[in-house]
Amino acid sequence: MDINQFAVYQLKNGPETRQMRFRSYEKLQQSGIQVRYEYYREVYLGKMQRQDTPENIRERLQKKIPKSFDGHSLSVSDVLVLNREGEITAYYVEKEGFTVIAGFIRIGSSGALLTFETTNFHIEGKAGSWLVLDTLIIDGREFFLMEHMEYGRNAAYVILDAEGKIVAEDNRNGFDENAKQQIREYLHPPKPVQKPEEKPPLENWQKYMENGEYLRSSEISEEQNYNMIDGRRNNMPPKKTRTSVLVKLHQKQAEIAKRSGKEVPQMAVAEDMERRRKSVSYTHLTLPTNSLV
């Protein structure tokens, strides 16, 4: 998903957000206060480059506030949400730097089994109970990093989708680049290479019927065996054309004449043949002497 944009969220005005305003994320955690999306409103949505970071976006906003920015200047307790090609990450703005927060942006689903607060979850094929340690949104879908409740970081993490299906196992580094690649492959599996459909071998009579050529009778007499009957007379070697004796004689005379340096006696041979032909013709046409008087 080729989307690169960011959004700035600031606390709504109200008694429920009074204790959160301009306080560090650590102080909120110590007070048991969670940073929830419903406490905030979006004050700006802008485009970003793929290589942009929260730090350089913050610098740009501090230098010049866009006209469509509907809030105060970026400050502590604001949330900066980056959507980098479908991968969404939320950053809590600190006095210096940022703190990545999980579960700020939620993707609602009627079939979702997991939320950021899920604990005591049983993964199919895995022993023990699990809790959600972190979340990540990629291409509009939310994924959950699960930690074993008994063994904690001593056991490998498991990544699940919102329906509880296993996306990646044996994870040791959370949502690192390798885990993100596994999630993208889960979302967009490679298409299987379709092999050309293989037709079953045909019987001889089927070959004849398939090509529709009326050559079977001639094939039976000409092909080397019945396995070669396929409607095409192409399995026999070409028939040899017989060369006449007279032609061979002429060729031999030409070779002898060429070696001896003499002219080829073509005319003499032709005249002799013509005389012989006429002599035979006259013999057959001559009437007997004792014909009718």
Image (tube, helix red, strand yellow):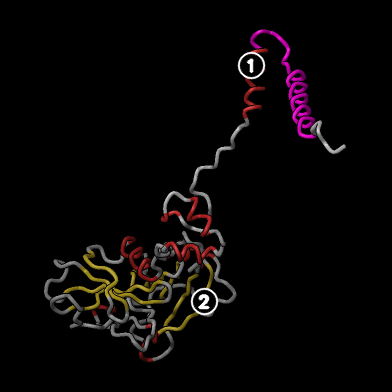
Q: Quadrant of residue 111?
A: bottom left
Q: Position of residue 151 (x, y in %)?
A: 12, 71
Q: Tell me, for residue 255, which label it has, or none.
A: 1
> Residue placed at 51% from the left, 59% from the top?
216
Which residue matches tag 2? Answer: 44
Q: Residues within 10 Å of mark 2 (few under 14, many from 20)?
A: some
* Lateral position of residue 128 relative to residue 227, left or right: left
**222 vs 125: above or below:** above
**127 vs 173: above or below:** below
**Res. 26 in view:** no
Q: Position of residue 1 (x, y in %)?
A: 48, 69
Q: Position of residue 238 (x, y in %)?
A: 54, 42
> Residue placed at 33% from the left, 65% from the top?
182
Specify which label sits upstream in the sequence, 2 or 1: 2
Q: Which residues are magenta?
A: 258-286
Q: Amino acid at mark 2?
A: Tyr
- Can you say which quadrant of the picture contains the C terminus? top right
Q: Amino acid at mark 1?
A: Glu
Q: Tell me, for residue 213, which label it has, or none.
A: none
